Amino acid sequence: MLFSSISHATDYSVSHNPYEDVNFNTTLRCLAQLHDHVNNNDPRVSSYDDAEYCAVTWMDYAGYYGNDTGLLVGMGSPKQWPPEDYGATAIPSLDNIKFYIPGAEEGGYLKDNITFAHHTHSTFMTEYIESAGCSTCNGGSAAPLTPTVGVPSNRLYETEQELVDLVNELGGWPIYNHPSVGPNTGLTGYKGIEIMNTFMSLRDQKDNEDSAGTGTRLTNARALWDTWLETVSARIYAVAVNDHYGPDHTVGVGTGGGSVPDDLVANDIDQGKIEVLLTVQDLEAFESSVRAGAFFAVHENETASKGAFPEVTNIVVGSNSITLTTTAGNETVRWIANGSSVGTNSFTLSLFGLDAGLKYVRAEIDDGSGRITYTQAFELVSPSPVHHSGFGEMGR
Ligand SMILES: [Zn+2]
């Protein structure tokens, strides 16, 4: 019986390593925020500067213009880019922020999401697009929207797939915002997915306080990421964001509001961010690294100061293994493939003798105090093209 189970074991090699072009000896680390509503808000930009970010998205909602239900009225103004034309805090007056990132949180009511307005982040896109409206959405109260005069028909969308396709067409990098709000199946073209969103984390916390264990937004988001990695593409990258709960958010009793705990403390905010590995600190290099997946999604904890999350100092992909190095070297590493654990507590994962059918493996590096750094997925291929030939080199 033992042999029959071993006979199912499969050897793999990595067919795509998102960090393969990173020189870990020289790389520049850029803390970035892709989804907080910093648009035209100087105190907010300054708070990110003080929190040692190197880049923030110049964004707010877009695509709602003409929505007569009162939802987000006034937030659908045409895209403000470049920020210097709209009164942005001057970069030279900032200490840490080196550039702004274009983007917006897109989405009015969609014909395939008729009970809520689902959101898609159009990272890197500078053009304005808009929901064409939906006469049957939200029980009919949401629509029809009236498209902004002058928005051409090829900048309007009706379904989420049309929205994602349009963002890709116009040079954007679409991210699925807070996916637990309404997971979709069958969508293609998303490049990123929020697996951590401070707003959603706080909503989970509130639900758990009100009714133990019912806060499942982040769990669901991570499960969806694994499903997409397995069934859609191993090159859909994990993103962590703040979404209204960045470093300038007011804390104290009475500051939470209805859907999050009403006694926010400083450590509740600024928990979601990405660390991007750059050759130079500019937008062009940043976009190149994000599109390649050369970044980590970071979930800070709720009990300590920010910035002490696990730092990955090297990633070596061998012919049949992956080895991580961190500054502390004492974290728990969880290796996840096709949504299940394939090993814990080793900084090296052997790709020999794993279950059949694996499409990817990824690592979660947990410091034991709630800070977790997520690597992107390594795409796997089998049978190994260099079957067992690595043994002779293992002593190096
Ligand atoms: Zn948002």
Image (cartoon, rainbow, N blue to C red):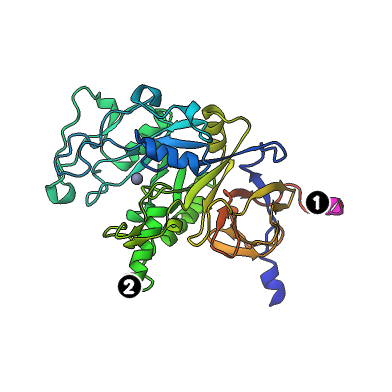
- Asked if 181 appears above or below 176 in the picture, the reply is below
The residues colored magenta run: 389-395
Q: Is residue 390 magenta?
A: yes
Q: CA distance from mark 1 to mark 2?
A: 52 Å
Q: Say which of marks 1 and 2 sits in front.
A: 2
311 left or right of 142 in image:
right
* Residue type beneath disc 2: Ser
Q: Nearer the viewer, residue 90 or 221?
A: 90
Describe the element under mark 1 as helix, strand or loop.
helix
Residue 79 appearing in the image: yes
Question: What percent of the width, then of the height, locates residue 12?
Answer: 68, 53
| Three-letter residue code for mark 1 | Gly
Report crowding for label 1: few under 14, some 14 to 19, many 20 or more residues within 10 A (C-alpha): few
Image quadrant of residue 17? top right
The residue where tag 2 is placed is 211
Give the residue at mark 1.
Answer: 390
* Predominant SS of the magenta segment: helix
Q: Is residue 123 left or right of residue 257?
A: right
Q: Position of residue 242 (x, y in %)?
A: 42, 49
- Label 2: element kind: loop
The reply, left or right, for residue 141 in relation to residue 367 is left
Q: Quadrant of ligand 1?
A: top left
- Residue depicted at 37% across the width and 49% down the height: 249
Q: Is mark 2 within 8 Å of ligand 1?
A: no
